[in-house]
Image: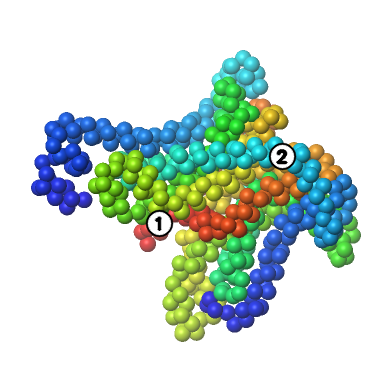
Amino acid sequence: MNTVRHPKLNTALGLVIIAVLLFPIYWMVNASLQPGGATVDTAWLPLNPDLAGYRTALEEQGGNLVTSLMVAVGSVALSLAVAVPAAYALVQFRIRWADYLLFGVLISQMIPGIVIANALYNVYAEIGLLNSIPGLILADSTAGIPFAILICRALMGSLPPALVEAAHVDGAGPVRAFLSVVVPVSRNAIITAGLFTFLFTWGDFLFALTLTTTEEVRPVTLGIYNYLGAYVNDWSSVMATAVLASLPAVVLLAVAQKYVAAGATGGAVK
Amino acid sequence: MSITSVHEATTAPTAPGQRGEGHAAPRVSARASAWRHRLVTALFIGPAVLYMLLFFGYPVVQNVIMGFQHYTITTFFTGEAPWAGWSNYTEVLTSPLFRTAAANTVIFTVGSILGQFLCGLGLALFFRRRFPLSGALRSLILLPWLIPLIVASAVWKWLLDTDAGALNRVLIGSGLVESGIPWLSSTGLALFTVIMVNIWIGIPFNAVILHGGLQTIPQELYEAGSIDGTSRWQAFRHITWPMLRPVVSVVLVLGVVYTLKVLDIILGLTEGGPANATQTLATQAYQLSFATFDFGQGAAVSNILILISLLFAAVYLRLNRRPVDE
């Protein structure tokens, strides 16, 4: 079933499928390189690439890109710091209510973000976390923390107990055993969790939309949305911003492919 | 486990679980070690529990409460949210917009899931074949799923533009249509268009998960089948589909749960318009809370959304357990 009679024909068919599926991505890059201003009839090929769109994008959205980056990095740090030890404790310490906690983590992924935004907006307004990077980091980690717990738990459950016991025999306490033995061998799961947390947070729109009200702290996703809200007369800079906002995904796919597949399957099927 | 504890009991007169402290007074150190164990557990798992309670537990409870309150813009100034009983729910449920949003949610969810699943399954089956570049092409499929949703909305909004969008230019250029089709600005078409875009976004996820499921089907089954002279369709019908069923159920249920809460794509493409043609329960909840600042009614719609999600979550957890028994 796996070996095919006409491998070249299949490759050709595969290329056509990918070309159709990825045409929107091509169009985004193409449109971003067109001379700005005129919206009529974008050329099919960027024969005279023009970087004006990128210049405008960086001028208008550069600060927002930095905000997105800070929020994403912060959320990765927070999510891993909270989730990795918890995942380890869930599988290695015998905790009576571990199953309930795990159940809570699974259910939490089903809760619509708007529910969280509704409640957080009011609390944030009271304690002054609206329009702040820490506020966004905390809210955005609602995607990263449960996901990281699930991914890391799946891997740590399969670690041989002898590994940790050996560290204990060497005189290491639970914290040191965790840091010097468990974390290094769980590297792959932790990297997967970290990369996806970054993507979740970088692409977050709902919390950016609801928990920021001014231009001071504005993630790039909201910057794009605000472009779309008004009549767009310069698509090249909108598409240039879109390309810049897609860079993390492209980089990830290029350099960390195996983690991407692991994250896609690990998060869903247990 | 019992073997180790017997072993420990016979070799050393200490309580189990504190090997390094053999000479301390047994009873005191047993209690101390229990305390230490509790402290370490709290250190490892405490932050996660606290976070889950604050950022999932509290919002759910708060939404349930807000659903029974007149929680509006004045609440921010007066700090008072008078009790409203069921009035938020009756008001929301009897408004004609709710019926539109509910119907749209069903159409949007069913249409998206069906399209994503069928395309994803087709791609998964296709990429199971081994041919030059199959691995590289398969990983490229993931790109639409990895870019931010709002980016996808922006790109599609430009592609589908009535006057200058690439799709209409192709259609007009090839003589298929006379003038540009108003994909996103026609009340009759907008929901269909939004579903198509959402299918595009969901195909990669479905393809990857189903491809993973296909990899677990033992090759021998097909070899045995080919000796018996089964056709391709028969092999799919009698080997692939039954073996893939557990993965299929998980993909479908997760798909429903994710699609129910989709907000980015609809807000980016149409804002729920034109004339509420693409309004769903999620966008309605958002607009009630954050456009009209009626958090009470917004919470009421959100709670209905939670209820539907939890219903599917229950299905998911049951399905998740079943493959273990089989």
Q: Which residue is mark 1?
A: B322
Secondary structure category for the residue under label 2:
helix
Which disc is residue B11 wearing?
none
Q: Amino acid at mark 2?
A: Gly
Circle 2 residue: A62
Q: Chain of mark 1?
A: B
Question: Could you give the CA–CA distance between mark 2 and mark 1, rounded to whole angstroms?
Answer: 50 Å
A108 and A185: which is toward the camera = A185
Q: B251 or B95, which lies in front?
A: B251
Residue furthest out toward the top: B78
Q: Position of residue B122 (x, y in %)?
A: 60, 67
Amino acid on which disc 1 is placed: Arg
Residue at 46 percent across and 84 percent down: it is B228
Q: Position of residue A63 (x, y in %)?
A: 70, 36
Residue positioned 89% across, 52% down in the render: A40
On the rendered structure, is B200 left or right of B243? right
Horizontal and vertical percent position of residue A4: 58, 79
Q: Nearer the viewer, residue B8 or B282?
A: B8
